[in-house]
Amino acid sequence: MKSRVILVLSLLCLSLSVWGSDDRRQKWWKWPSTGKSICSSVVLPLYGNVYPQGFYYAQINIGHPPRPYFLDPDTGSDLTWLQCDAPCVHCTQAPHPYYRPNNDLVPCKDPLCASLHSGDHICDDPGQCDYEVEYADGGSSLGVLINDVSLLNLTTGVRITPRLAIGCGYDQIPGPSYQPLDGVLGLGKGKTGIVSQLHSQGLIRNVVGHCFSSRGGGFLFFGDDIYDPSRIISTPMSRDYTKHYSPGYGEIIYGGKATGLKNLLVIFDSGSSYTYLSSKAYEGLLYMVTKELSGKPIQEALDDETLPFCWKGRRPFRSMRDVKKYFKPLALSFSSGWRSKTQFEIPLEGYLLISAKGSVCLGVLNGTEVGLQNFNIIGDISMQDKMVIYDNEKQTIGWTPANCDRPPRSDTMSI
């Protein structure tokens, strides 16, 4: 494995001599200039949407020969796992045949195995690493950790097959937000996260980002050479809450004005389709929204169960343009330094959606009701049409408005 890493490294950091010009390139892309030495990135297309499908997913090719799997890109968890025919004790419906594991087991004493367990982990079987991951919605996956190759294309045009530790999940308990996919793509900060593993092999910088299109699809990337850092709005990751991608505590801004809803511990979580607020903040936001609607020709749509709160007008709404006069934009304000604030803007499309019945529904949900006692989740709906970047080297979370419909350098995407 070490010889493979050394060989790939010699190919990755290239001195590029010629790059074509294209005025249509978007400004938030970072295009290397002549002669600049760079390291590469991996770009993956995303599929799906917040509504009506309810989730985004990426295709990862794993195994020898490589086989495709549709995975949920989740910045809220570390481990990448596949539903696995080991044989499978309990697996859910999946778009592809269950993953057939090889015999390359990760031993219990491996540091990657230790990172999955808290405290002094006792090895029932020294030859293998057993795992169990549990999610906020009550779902879980039980299995063993194995090593296998993943086929990835770099933005330099080089194709690599790094050996990665992934979970062979042979016993799944689906939660309420279960999606019919082959597994989870763990993008969290831990050692077992796929980006952390690629970084530890010297292949990319420890940076991951995504761009969800409100029209569906988008792209996911590992590494930092596809965007211009000078155009990114960023805030430091919390030093007190390091388990997840958190900017720390934030305050809700509604219609450009402070609301008093503050000291909210916020997590950016691409594994959540919707945004969740703790009960007090949720009820405060709902109060402000309904107060704003008072006296206007719009009323609660009790017959629309798309989401807990939907409203209807005199005629069915067809697009967000039809409701802009009734609602105001949101934002979350974070402390980004001494007397410095950074705002994460949330336009109407970032917290509302138009249902199949022509109602407008609130895409912010009560997190306390689903067990998120102390956390407030920024989900996919609020991150649409933005490039969101988690830089584990600079310890920052950044974002910038972006057109997510056309991935940068689409000719070298891993598909």
Image (cartoon, helix red, strand yellow):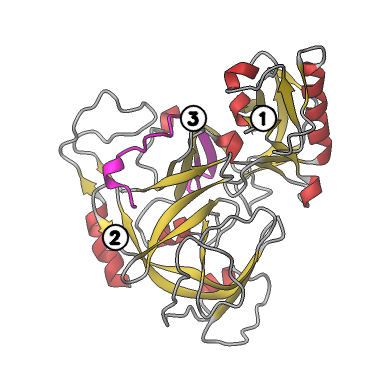
Q: Is residue 182 left or right of residue 118?
A: left
Vertical arrangement, residue 305 with respect to residue 11, above or below: above
The x and y percentages for residue 373 are: 80, 49
Vertical arrangement, residue 146 with respect to residue 317, above or below: below
Q: Amino acid at mark 3?
A: Thr
Is residue 397 found inside the magenta-colored segment of the image?
Answer: yes
For marks 3 and 2 on the same chain, the one whose residue lies earlier in the sequence: 2
Q: Which residues are magenta?
A: 389-415
C-alpha span from label 1 to label 2? 39 Å
Give the SS element for disc 2: strand
Is residue 141 found inside the magenta-colored segment of the image?
Answer: no
For marks 3 and 1 on the same chain, the one whose residue lies earlier in the sequence: 1
Give the SS element for disc 3: strand
Instruction: Name the residue carrying label 3.
Output: 400
Q: Is residue 142 visible?
A: yes
For marks 1 and 2 on the same chain, the one whose residue lies earlier in the sequence: 2
The total of numbered circles placed on residues is 3
Instruction: Name the residue carrying label 2.
Output: 160
Contact? badges 3 and 2 (CB < 8 Å) = no
The x and y percentages for residue 347 are: 60, 24
* Residue sitting at x 54%, y 45%: 395
Neighbour tally class for label 1: few under 14, some 14-19, many 20 plus, Cα within 10 Å? many
Q: Is residue 205 left or right of residue 298?
A: left
User: Which corner quadrant of the image does residue 311 belong to?
Assistant: top right
Q: Amino acid at mark 1?
A: Leu
User: Which corner quadrant of the image does residue 36 belong to?
Assistant: top left
Q: Amino acid at mark 2?
A: Ile
